[in-house]
Image: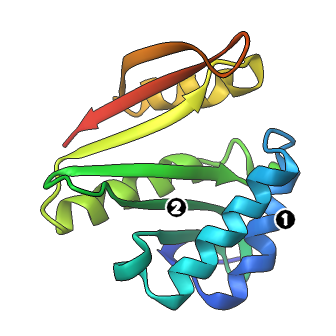
Amino acid sequence: MSAPSVNASLPEDLPAILEAARSVSVFNDEEVLTVDELFQGYLKDPAVSGYNFLSCKDGDTLLGFACWGPTALSQGATDLYWICTAQHAQGRGVAAALFDAVEDAVRARGRWLIVIWTSSREAYAPARRFYLRMGCTLQTQITDFYARDEDLCVYVKYL
């Protein structure tokens, strides 16, 4: 096996990206469909859609993916929409490699802020801990945003 690498996602990565999203058992069907929809925008034109995808692979095997894009009407902010490590690849540093690659891409575009929205549900506790480990700060929490007893947690990282 070769060393894992992170590169721009290819059209043929989509089935594995969707399978990775399903494998973690955190995202519901609507959220997985949203990943598909955003990927279709990415394939058409990332500059128009605002969506960029990165894939982390070991050879031909997809280990995880990230979706990010510049925040509309902002000179410096970037949204990190998704970062996902396939169930079979967890614990191998995939998410950190993807986050680092997003940071590099954001810096290369002259932007200086990454904004991440996530849930307060217990299933998302590992993601919230990950963002803190990556140097992000919980900027705000909006009570009952997604549903009753499910808050929106907004993390930021200044580059």
* Position above or below: 47 against 120: below
Q: Name the image quarter holding residue 63.
A: bottom right
* Residue drawn at x 46%, y 14% as measured from the top left: 141
* Position above or below: 91 against 58: above
Residue 43 appears at what percent x and percent y? 55, 87
Q: Name the image quarter holding residue 10.
A: bottom right
> Tags 1 and 2 in contact by the CB under 8 Å rule?
no
Q: As drawn, is 149 to the left or to the right of 24? A: left
Between 9 and 74, the one nearer to me in the picture: 74
* Residue drawn at x 30%, y 65% as measured from the top left: 105
Q: Which residue is mark 1?
A: 19
* Residue drawn at x 57%, y 51% as measured from the top left: 82
Q: Name the image quarter holding residue 24.
A: top right
Q: Which residue is mark 2?
A: 67
SS class, disc 2: strand
Question: Label 2: how many residues lie within 10 Å, few (<14), some (14-19) or many (20+)?
Answer: many
